[in-house]
Image (spheres, coloured by chain):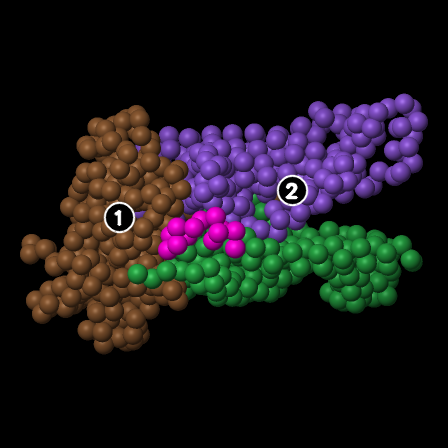
Chain colours: A green, B purple, C brown
Amino acid sequence: MMEFSTWDIVRNLLLAARWTIVLSLVAFAGGATVGLVILFLRISKQKAARVFAGGYIELFQGTPLLMQLFLSFFGLSLLGVEVPAWLAASVALILWTASFLAEIWRGCVESIPKGQWEASASLGMGRFEQMRHVILPQALTIAIPPTVGFSVQVVKGTSLTSIIGFTELAKAGQVLTNATFMPFTVYGFVALIYFALCFPLSKSSQFLERKLNVAHRDH
Amino acid sequence: MGYVFDYSWIGEYSGVLLKGLWLTVWLILVGATFGVALGIFCAWVRALGPKWARPIVGAYVELIRNTPFLIQLFFIFFGLPSLGVQMGETQAALLAMIINLGAYGCEIVRAGIQATTKGQFEAGWSLGLSRIETFRHVVLIPALQRIWPALSSQIVIVMLGSAVVSQIAAEDISYAADFIQSRTFRAFETYIVATLIYLALAILLRQLLKGVGWVLFPKRSAAR
Amino acid sequence: MPFLTRRAVVAAFAALAAVMVGAPHSARAELADITTRGTLRVAVPQDFPPFGSVGLDMTPQGYDIDVAKLIAEKLGVKIELTPVTSANRIPFLQTNKVDLVISSLGKNPDREKVIDFSTAYAPFFNGVFAPDNVAVTKVEDLSGKTVGVTRGSVEDLELTKIIPADATVKRYDNNNGTISAFLSGQVQVVATGNVVAAAIIEKNPPKKPLLKFLIKNSPCFVGMNKDQPNLKAKVDEIIAAAKADGTMNAIAQKWLKTDLPKDL
């Protein structure tokens, strides 16, 4: 009869946490890329683009991530796109992350005073150039703290992939609970590992925010 | 071979969906009420409460905000019984939602409170208001007005996040979808319908919260 | 919260509605596709000992996994195991994420409408289990009790038909949930497989699921998508050969600690 020691539990959870980290990185990197596209559409001069981006954000922020995962999981292949399980999970996480990042960044872009747009336009810059040279560099500084803050939600969001059968930290916790009959210990450790991943991100977001505020006050 | 969509099950299972909808609505209405109350209480403790209690509330807020809701739910439902704390899945789901919203609510309300200046607070005192009264009239109400939109978003997020309570067999909308799916093998169609219900619910909830804001803070709304 | 126009909301609904009625296409893997690909993708349980559970290194092991390996070996291809839950194993097949479901899958008319089954490869009796102090001997005794079951399993479907109206059925997403709920005292009674209960008892849990009564004899079959005559024939052939030459019996001895029943 095999017995799991406390170390076996922790070791297996840590091994599974690698997948949580990989999924988080994929979701965040992909989400940032798609989010940037949605951001451009959202602040575009074209009405159709704005409506599309608005609908996108409404759809992904107005429905549960769990449902998005199910739909991506069972839907993509029905639409004829053959993807492995981890990719289907990533697609849902990426689209969900993008909707939040786009909205966070829009707030940052819009906090740049209108005068800057007008000034750069008077210099003969096109919209893309304005964004690239004038608006984004400033918006970026403002955007860093909330973006880092949102990464915590991404890490936590990956726990839902356990429900569609992806073996990451949360799933490993479930499996180990039944192998050991020690739910309190196992879920305690699972929570601690998530905390160890998320807390530094939360703290650095707060730290960056404070630093930024101080910088602004000094102006 | 093409896959043919089939929604003919909706009639037979509409009762299951409605029952699920009712639980989700009940959970968010009760959960939001107590969650916001807990958040305000925690914000008060952190700002003006007894010194010894502040780090405890701080630890609670950080712990909840930095761990997934799903794990909090499992911990309450599967883990706590080994300490002799046993509760049904609906209570566990509700408790998890209250604790979760309480932590986020605390941070949101606190951000609103911090915008209140020391001078305003002292003015309240000098008018002869007690500590609690000053907190209520000078600090809390203006703070709530300021942060109501942020709090509303958080409530919608908690409602959408509640979809995972089906994992402990609480019979909400996503449970209904899982149940129907296991009977009809129409996974995709079932989840599409469930997703539409959630979307409608999110939009309605946002409108409702806007309405609540109007009632709670009439002056400000009138001024707009 | 996003400041969104009514138009955005309409767009969101329209997008979902479009997905609802779209005309998709789903490719099915026949035997030739599997041999060309060189891997057999099999859905197996990881929360259902002794059919499938995890070892110390978290890799799946059990009766179902051994059968999966056997079939892959006879097909001369590599194996790719995908852990699934009872609730989502059929959708995994329908959406072509796996070629075969070897996940202690029982057969019933509803399932036969959507997927095909091989011949039986393992015995399975499901029943109602509870600790010593719970007085239940027949289905009527469940009246007023709370029974945990894994959603979408044969026990769920069968029990739902016969259980008294005043009994409560709690349906969990996967066997982990069902077993955890029983062991943590969230439900007094569980419906599951006899060997599953035996595997739990063997690990000496705080609460022992003892057999109260059997619900149904529901042997396990390999599930596959419809219209794959070559794959079905080949899987049947492999199972028949394994039964004849004692390979299957050895797997039964290893995991169930008993011989295969003669009538399987």
For this rendering, which residue is in front, A93 or A115? Answer: A93
Return the residue at label 1.
C197
Percent position (x, y) of residue B216?
72, 26
Which residue lies under the disc numbered 2? B103
Q: Residue C57 in the image: state x and y as whole percent.
A: 39, 67
Amino acid at dot 2: Ala
Q: Which residues are magenta?
A: A177-189
Q: Are marks 2 and 1 in contact (CB under 8 Å)?
A: no
Q: Label 2: few (<14), some or many (≥20) within 10 Å?
A: many
Q: Is residue A210 visible?
A: yes
Chain at tag 1: C
Q: Chain of mark 2?
A: B
For this rendering, which residue is in front, C236 or B192?
C236
**Is C183 on the left-hand or right-hand side of C110?**
right
Image quadrant where one finds the C terminus of chain B: top right
The Cα–Cα distance between marks 2 and 1, rounded to whole angstroms, is: 40 Å
Q: Amino acid at mark 1?
A: Ala
